[in-house]
Amino acid sequence: MDSKVLIATRVARELKSGSLANLGIGLPTLVASYLPKDVEVSFQSENGIIGMSTLPHPGLFDEDLTDAGGTPIGSVPGACAFDSSFSFGLIRGGHLDVTVLGGLQVDERGLLANWMVPGKMVPGMGGAMDLVAGAKRVIVAMTHTAKGSPKIVKECSLPLTAVRRVDLVVTDLAVIEPTDEGLVLREVAPGVSIEDVLEATEATLIVPDDVPEMALEA
């Protein structure tokens, strides 16, 4: 299974029917395509829509209907659009049940860096800070390493997105839960050993006696 598909499939198992969920730019947008058939979630985008969906058919899109990254999206019956001030009122008011965001680094405290690399041109933080601070639950969906370097580190060297600890990290190697005691290894991906995860991780991981294989089926 492709690593991004694996991550999106596992994250989708975390979403519950009736929840209002935000999907960040990039890999997180794939999550909508892998929801279990019996789960109904309302997807929100910070540029101003509730009820977004994947495109029903390739090439069938409205150039005025996009996600926050400018990627064309579809909409479900009953979807609604609104301005950015209302959208961020939802986010800052704590009305989002969950947000799924990409990550550049997560450290031993569970803090996320995901909005810029120093020296590279970036348009700004966008909604990342508000989403991490305002959503009831924050899930990070990212590859475990980048060009061979660990992305789960002892301390973030990149600018932090917020000072709020994230709730879950799902990578192509593992599911990791940040806790008061530290980062707990909850699951490993199919075909991946605990030793593989430890070798690819700079941060210290707490390894329980039982670490099951990543749950990909509903």
Image (spheres, rainbow, N blue to C red):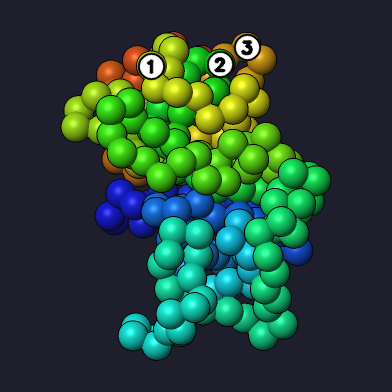
First in sequence: mark 3 vs mark 2? 2
Image quarter for residue 194?
top left
Dot 1 amino acid type: Ser
Q: Secondary structure at mark 3?
A: loop
Contact flag, marks 1 and 3 (Cβ < 8 Å): no
Image location (x, y in percent) of residue 37: 58, 72
Residue 88 lies left or right of residue 10; in this view the side is right
Height in image: 138 above or below 112? below
Image location (x, y in percent) of residue 157: 38, 16
Dot 3 amino acid type: Glu
Contact flag, marks 2 and 1 (Cβ < 8 Å): no
Q: Secondary structure at mark 1?
A: loop
- On the rendered image, what quadrant is the N terminus found in? bottom left
- On the rendered image, what quadrant is the C terminus found in? bottom right
* Residue depicted at 62% across the width and 81% down the height: 76
Find the distance from the CA under tag 3 to the CA under tag 2.
9 Å
Image location (x, y in percent) of residue 197: 34, 25
| Residue of label 2 | 109
Height in image: 124 above or below 109? below
Res 198 seen here: no
Number of callouts: 3
Dot 2 amino acid type: Arg
First in sequence: mark 1 vs mark 3? 1
Bin the neighbour count of mark 3 within 10 Å (Cα to Cα): few under 14, some 14-19, many 20 and up. Answer: few
Image location (x, y in percent) of residue 36: 56, 66
| Residue of label 3 | 181
| Residue of label 1 | 157
First in sequence: mark 2 vs mark 1? 2
Find the distance from the CA under tag 2 to the CA under tag 1.
13 Å
Residue 131 lies left or right of residue 25; in this view the side is right
